Amino acid sequence: MGYSEVRFEKDSLFLVTGAAGFIGSNLCEAILNLGYKVRALDDLSTGKQENVDLFLENPNYEFIKGDIKDLDTCMKACEGVDYVLNQAAWGSVPRSLEMPLFYSLNNIQGTLNMLEAARQQGVKKFVYASSSSVYGDEPKLPKKEGVEGNLLSPYALTKRCDEEWAKQYTMHYGLDTYGLRYFNVFGRRQDPNGAYAAVIPKFIKQLLDGEVPTINGDGKQSRDFTYIENVIEANLKACLAPHEAAGQAFNIAYGGREYLIDIYYGLTEALGVDVEPNFGPDRKGDIKHSNADISKAKELLGYDPDWSFDRGIKAAIEWYKENL
């Protein structure tokens, strides 16, 4: 179960882009703990220096401050690399509606630069972050690869474009690519601050600080909240996936369905506070319900997530209590 048994060749070198971010820093930590080498790349535009500093003492860790929008930087970063875990991107649906040009440059051109650099440098496997937002307004649940609707935001569009470019690189250039459609990832080191913070860390911080959280909409929207350990497992197992599975995208989730209002009251109970939330307007571009069919990832990647929402949320709450 999980990824503790995953094995690579002894001196394997992983490039993690977006390494100063929430998911990227957790990937770096897991790979180092397994005894492999990590080269980390981040421009620190949304990531945090403290997430880089955690590993600087480790001789197997190297950090490059650089931008995936620059092809030369990507070429240097991919030199001698076996596996690329491309997490670098700007997140947030609402912010993408305000900054469409930047999202295109960063999330599409940046990923394309990484694909080209990985191809030229002879990387074995290219694993990249996609998103459940690519399902758009498709109403059917659970979400299944191949049944997508109209895209509802520039952010979703960038992720869909990344999938199409990756498919081209597998088809024409012999680069094995694997897209991971993350569903609402949460866990340690996810930033609770800022206007675009993810809902779980934001609620926890506000409740710990004695503030009244605001729920967008009626709270009856549902999500397949997925603990960070499951995402680490998916990335590492994709690096070992067969060529036959390349050029495709996979749902990465637990396969559950949690309602926002239930999560909210669960957090108040776990934190021992009694605060009724405020309710605000729906967020533009948001999907109302989202949960994943993960059978394709199980079958083709050997993905077998063992962190349920309940187990993950307990671990996350403990981490925030100690670190906020």
Image: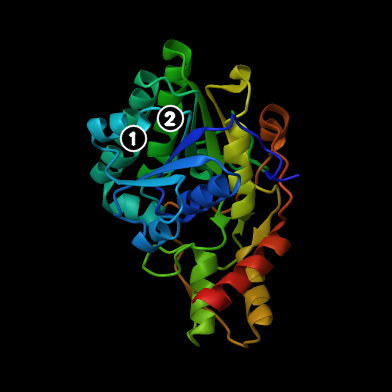
Q: Residue at x 50, y 23 (%)?
A: 124
323 shown above or below 227: below
Give percent across and percent down for residue 211. 47, 85
Give percent across and percent down for residue 172. 43, 11
Q: Which residue is mark 1?
A: 77
Residue 153 visible in the current orientation: no
Q: Which residue is mark 2?
A: 81
Identified by mark 1, the residue type is Ala
Quadrant occupied by the N terminus: top right
Which residue, as the protein is rendered here, is positioned at the far front?
59
Identified by mark 2, the residue type is Val
Pick whichever, 222 or 195, lies toward us: 195
Q: How is the image coloured?
A: rainbow
44 shown above or below 305: below
Q: Is 274 on the left-hand or right-hand side of 286?
A: right
Cα distance in 3D space between marks 2 and 1 = 8 Å
Is label 1 in a helix, a strand or a loop? helix
Q: Are marks 2 and 1 in contact (CB under 8 Å)?
A: yes
Structural crowding at the residue carrying mark 1, measured as other residues with C-alpha within 10 Å and reported as few (<14), some (14–19) or many (≥20): many
Q: Is 241 on the left-hand or right-hand side of 84?
A: right
205 shown above or below 299: below
Q: Residue at x 56, y 77 (%)?
A: 322
Give percent across and percent down for residue 136. 50, 42
